[in-house]
Structures are given as structure tokens and as C-alpha cells.
Amino acid sequence: MVHGFVKQSGGHIKIHSKIGKGTTVRIYLPRSRDPDDVLVETKPSAVKGGTEQVLVVEDDDEVRATAGDMLTELGYNVLKAKDPDSALAIIDSGIVVDLMFTDVVMPGKLQSTELARRARQRLPHLAVLFTSGYPDAAIVHRNMLDTDATILNKPYSREELAAKIRQVLQKPQQFIATQKT
């Protein structure tokens, strides 16, 4: 996530490590000459959740827990999987899943696009939303996802998550996973 944020911001990272001494991480971000932001009074936005069943597939325990908590607060029924194999086991159990919210980069042999393809074979109505700490351009450039896949960049706010989930659930057939070569 840090790497993605720094690259999106036009910066870079230097890591220096010595055995027995430790590691120093330096983050360089471009300087802005823009005037400081002015605080503006805003009206709270109406965050819309739902009652659908969402399967969160995320290998990082803390990120998985946080995403699950946000979705639960929004009213969704949440199932969690730590990897693609666990996600498919949940889907194969017969539990109805309306949306799969999965990280783009997952450990193991089964990548997220293949997970989405297999999940949609089992549940053709399944909506899929990808998330990643990598910038969109890096994801497309590395052929991690089709250009028409729906993605929510990390870090994201509760409001961004709510809006993107509703968008994807309204058009569940928009993504068909294909493995790019």
C-alpha cells in the first residue's frame, strides 16, 4: 500500500538495511507549491450500504478485518477468506454470495483474475470488485487485470467503499475474468 501511494504521488522509496543494525526506509514525495487547502464546511454524505452477502478475499489479516468491519457497519453480511482457495471453498459450500471483494495480488498459484473466473463459473450472478494498493496504471501495465475490471484503490474510505460496492452490485455482469498472456 505504501509503495502504491508513493508511486501514485510521483515519489520514490529508498531502503537501506544492515544486518544487526536495522533498516531505514526513506519516502520521497514531490514538493507542492499549491496554496494550503482551505477548510470548507460540507454536509455529511448519505452513505448507502445494503444487506447483500459479501465475500472479502484478502491475505493481510488486518486489512481483511478492517474491510469486513466497514462492510458489516454498512449492513452487509460478510464472509472472509484469506486466500483464493478458501474463497472457492466458501463458494462451493453453497452459501449465497452476491459480491466478491478481492485483492488483486494474492499469494499462491491462483491469481485473483482466475479466482474471479472460477467463482463466476459457479455463481454466474456474482459481482466482483477488485482492490489494490498499486496504482491503476501499474495494474493495467502489468496485465494484472482487464482494463474493464472494476477496482477500488487502497487506501479507501468507508464512503468510497460503500459507493463502489453499490455501483458494482447494480451491474453484476460487467466483469468477466480472463487471464491475459
Image (cartoon, rainbow, N blue to C red):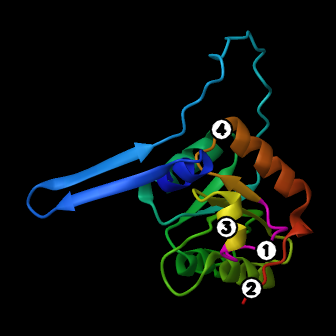
- The label shown at residue 158 is 4
Alpha carbon separation for disc pair 1 and 2: 8 Å
Asked if residue 53 can be seen in this view, the reply is: yes
Q: Secondary structure at mark 4?
A: helix
Upstream in sequence: badge 2 or badge 3: 3
Using a 10 Å C-alpha cutoff, classify the residue at mark 4 as few (fewer than 14 neighbours), some (14 to 19) or many (20 or more). few
Mark 4 or mark 3, whichever is nearer to me: 3
**Is the residue under label 3 in contact with that under label 4 (CB below 8 Å)?**
no
Q: Which residue is mark 2?
A: 180
For image coordinates 8% across by 60% down, the residue present is 20
Q: Nearer the viewer, mark 4 or mark 1?
A: 1
Residue 146: assigned label: 1
Q: Amino acid at mark 4?
A: Arg
Query: Which sits in the foreground, 29 or 116?
Result: 29
- What's the magenta region? 142-150
Which of the two labelled residues, at mark 3 and mark 1, occupies the earlier sequence position? 3
Which callout, 4 or 2, points at the residue further toward the start of the chain? Answer: 4
Lower position in the chain sequence, tag 4 or tag 3: 3
Q: Secondary structure at mark 1?
A: loop
Amino acid residing under circle 1: Asp
Kind of element beneath mark 3: helix
Say few, some or many: other residues with alpha carbon within 10 Å of mark 1 (under 14 / 14 to 19 / 20 or more).
Answer: some
Residue drawn at x 59%, y 29% as measured from the top left: 32
